[in-house]
């Protein structure tokens, strides 16, 4: 998805409200102004990509905001559905049954948001479309099937810190969040999962499940043949003893670049029929994949909307760094306004890598005009 040179438009809805100007009313107006209601035609399926929050997390996007987005999309005659993909790690969203249960428990029922939920990569994370790209690390990426097949997409992203990528916004939401389990493994690690012999009980459940026949019992313990393994990572979730682990051999910049390439692959399936809404609210220091949410590091700064994922992420980081940090939060020293909050949280992580690589892939621009609504 190549975008023309020039500045992107990013619309800002701040969090101030009164009886004449509520935040949700201005969000609805911004959705129309930003052009998000024009990305799909009547009858087209629109994937509303978001993160439903791990069980125990509380910083995910609030359902009244999600409901407002759904209503604005429905008014155009398109058919929106909420979606996400199963996690690589074992947690409350590692298969679609548990994922749906967690989403409902966190408030994302049809009655509250007005749209059904579809877990885009299937029951155990194995459903994907292989999309060719011209990347530094990949020539093709594995995008979750029901996201790839949707006619258009709106990404709702809760902006927060992240120990591996510095921060998570739109690029992470559609890149890491748009890949199947095999795609997530490819982004995180260049080698295959490994069995912990201390934890393995030799039940052979992983052997019967493995689609490549890469697992066998060796001295009554499961063992993975790295030459046969296809990297689907489904054995990680299938194992009842959590004895199969990822071999973490990544470096931060490499993972960020891979993530941006997955975002480019997803964008290639949409032909510019995408919109992005970043919620710079409850900015927690860690990802919503944790089963808890730490205190916000800055005051709620607002909601940003754009047709450009690079611009909306750059604007989100800029907006956060302009804020004064909250004393008593996870911030160590950079509490003053106009300081880099994410480098305070994760000094060894250069968060700009994902933005710059996404820009170099033609996903968008770091130059933007901020327009208040």
Image (tube, helix red, strand yellow):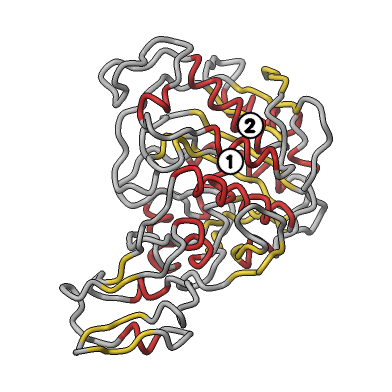
Quadrant in the picture for residue 369:
top right
For residue 289, above or below residue 27: below
Which is nearer the eye, 314 or 122? 314
Query: Which x, y percent locates residue 275?
Result: 70, 41
Q: Which residue is mark 2?
A: 312
Q: Are marks 1 and 2 in contact (CB under 8 Å)?
A: yes
Compared to residue 318, the image places residue 130 above or below, namely below
**Residue at horizontal 29 percent and vertical 15 percent from the top:** 327
- Camera-nearest residue between 84 and 42: 84
Q: Position of residue 185 (x, y in %)?
A: 46, 62
Q: For residue 355, what is the image quadrant? A: top right
Report if residue 67 is visible in the image: no
Q: Which mark is residue 258?
A: none
Q: Residues within 10 Å of mark 2 (few under 14, many from 20)?
A: many
Query: Which secondary structure lies at badge 1?
Result: helix
Residue 131 on image: x %, y %: 69, 64
- Relative placement, left or right, of 70 versus 291 is right
What is the secondary structure assignment of the residue under circle 2?
A: helix
Q: Is residue 165 above or below residue 333?
A: below
Is there any visible trace of residue 110 in the rendered image? yes
Residue under label 1: 170
Residue at the spot 67% in from the left edge and 62% down from the top edge? 139
The one of 109 and 36 positioned closer to us in this rendering: 36
Q: CA distance from mark 1 to mark 2?
A: 7 Å
């Amino acid at each position: 998805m190549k975008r023309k040179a020039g500045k992107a438009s990013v619309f800002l809805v701040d969090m101030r409200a009164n009886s004449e100007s509520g935040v949700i009313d201005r969000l609805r107006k911004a959705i129309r102004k930003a052009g998000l209601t024009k990305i799909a035609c009547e009858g087209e399926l629109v994937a509303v990509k978001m993160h439903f929050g791990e069980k125990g997390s509380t910083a995910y996007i609030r359902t009244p905001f999600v409901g407002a987005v759904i209503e604005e999309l429905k008014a155009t005659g398109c058919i929106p559905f909420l979606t996400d993909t199963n996690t690589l790690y074992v947690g409350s969203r590692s298969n679609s049954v548990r994922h749906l249960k967690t989403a409902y428990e966190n408030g994302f029922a049809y009655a509250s948001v007005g749209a059904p939920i579809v877990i885009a990569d299937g029951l155990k994370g194995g459903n994907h479309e292989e999309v060719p790209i011209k990347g530094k690390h990949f020539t093709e990426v594995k995008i979750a099937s029901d996201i790839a097949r949707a006619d258009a997409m709106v990404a709702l992203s809760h902006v927060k810190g992240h120990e591996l990528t510095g921060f998570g916004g739109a690029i992470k939401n559609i890149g890491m969040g748009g890949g199947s389990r095999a795609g997530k493994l490819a982004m995180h690690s260049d080698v295959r999962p490994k069995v912990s012999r201390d934890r393995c009980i030799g039940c052979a459940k992983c052997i019967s499940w493995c689609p490549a026949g890469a697992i066998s019992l060796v001295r009554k313990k499961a063992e993975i043949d790295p030459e046969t393994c296809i990297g689907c990572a489904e054995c990680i979730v299938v194992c009842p003893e959590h004895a199969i682990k990822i071999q973490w051999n990544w470096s931060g910049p490499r993972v960020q670049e891979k993530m941006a390439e997955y975002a480019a692959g997803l964008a290639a399936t949409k032909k510019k029929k995408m919109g992005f809404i970043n919620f710079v609210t409850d900015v927690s220091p860690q990802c919503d994949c944790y089963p808890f949410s730490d205190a916000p590091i800055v005051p709620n700064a607002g909601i940003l909307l754009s047709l450009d994922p690079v611009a909306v992420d750059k604007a989100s980081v800029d907006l956060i760094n302009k804020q004064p940090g909250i004393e008593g939060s996870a911030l160590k020293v950079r509490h003053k306004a106009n300081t880099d909050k994410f480098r305070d949280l994760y000094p060894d992580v250069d968060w700009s890598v994902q933005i710059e690589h996404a820009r170099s892939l033609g996903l968008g621009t770091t130059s933007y005009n901020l327009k208040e609504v």
